[in-house]
Image (tube, rainbow, N blue to C red):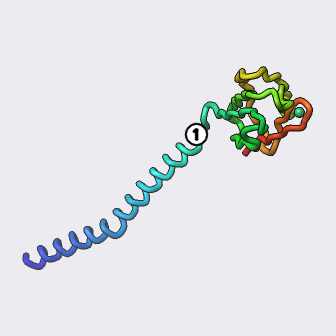
Amino acid sequence: MKSALRQLKKSMRKKQKYINSIVLPLLFVLAMTIQTHAQARAMNQKPKLQTARVVITDQGYSRTRIVLRRGVPTRITFLRQTDATCATEVVIPAYGINRSLPLNTPIAVSFTPKRSGEFNFTCGMNMMRGKLVVQ
Ligand SMILES: [Cu+2]
């Protein structure tokens, strides 16, 4: 009788050891995996719109490099604040865009970058230049 009880205790202890060594680590890995997947999904979610703003002053374009994500609808707002440069229009040849920029009037240019690479935006005479970097 006593030995049977001891046997039972022993087997329960074994079971507990088994749970500690196998099941708990598995649960931990499972939890980590679920969390990692959730994070990856959140990071992969595409924004609905990406925007940038370029101001044109006596110094030229306020920025000459705009990094964009491929496949995400894009709106770039150009604002010309000076008559001293020739940037009275903006041209983005890769997207067939050619818009005039009236003084002190924000002009929004919209497109969706389909290919990765570097594409110019320029003034009407291709003298002032900036780059769209599509990744
Ligand atoms: Cu020019």
Rendered-image quarter of ligand 1: top right
| Image coordinates for residue 53, horizontal then vertical, percent | 68, 33
| Secondary structure of the residue carrying numbered label 1 | loop
How many marks do you count on the picture? Answer: 1
Q: Is residue 44 above or below residue 29?
A: above
Q: Quadrant of the N terminus?
A: bottom left
Q: Residue at x 79, y 40 (%)?
A: 115
Q: Nearer the viewer, residue 133 or 115?
A: 133
Given the current orientation, which residue lies at the most extreme bottom position?
A: 3
* Residue located 30% across and 68% down the image: 20
Q: Which residue occupies the extreme left position in the image? A: 1
**Can you say which quadrant of the picture contains the C terminus?**
top right
Query: Viewed as shown, does residue 108 lie left or right of 38?
Result: right
- Per the image, the residue denoted by label 1 is 45
Can I make out residue 114 in this image? no
Q: Residue at x 22, y 72 (%)?
A: 13
Could you say which quadrant of the image residue 10 lies in?
A: bottom left
Give coordinates of residue 41: x percent, y percent.
54, 44
Q: Which residue is at 77% across, 43% downward?
A: 116
**Quadrant housing residue 6:** bottom left
Pick whichever, 103 or 65, lies toward us: 103
Q: Position of residue 33 (x, y in %)?
A: 47, 54
* Location of residue 81 in the rendering, given as x and y in whole percent from the top left corner: 73, 28
> Viewer-proximal residue, 97 or 53?
53
Residue type indicated by callout 1: Gln
Q: Is residue 35 left or right of residue 129?
A: left
Ligand 1 under 8 Å from disc 1 Cβ: no
Q: Nearer the viewer, residue 114 or 119?
A: 119
Vertical position of residue 15 compared to residue 45: above or below: below
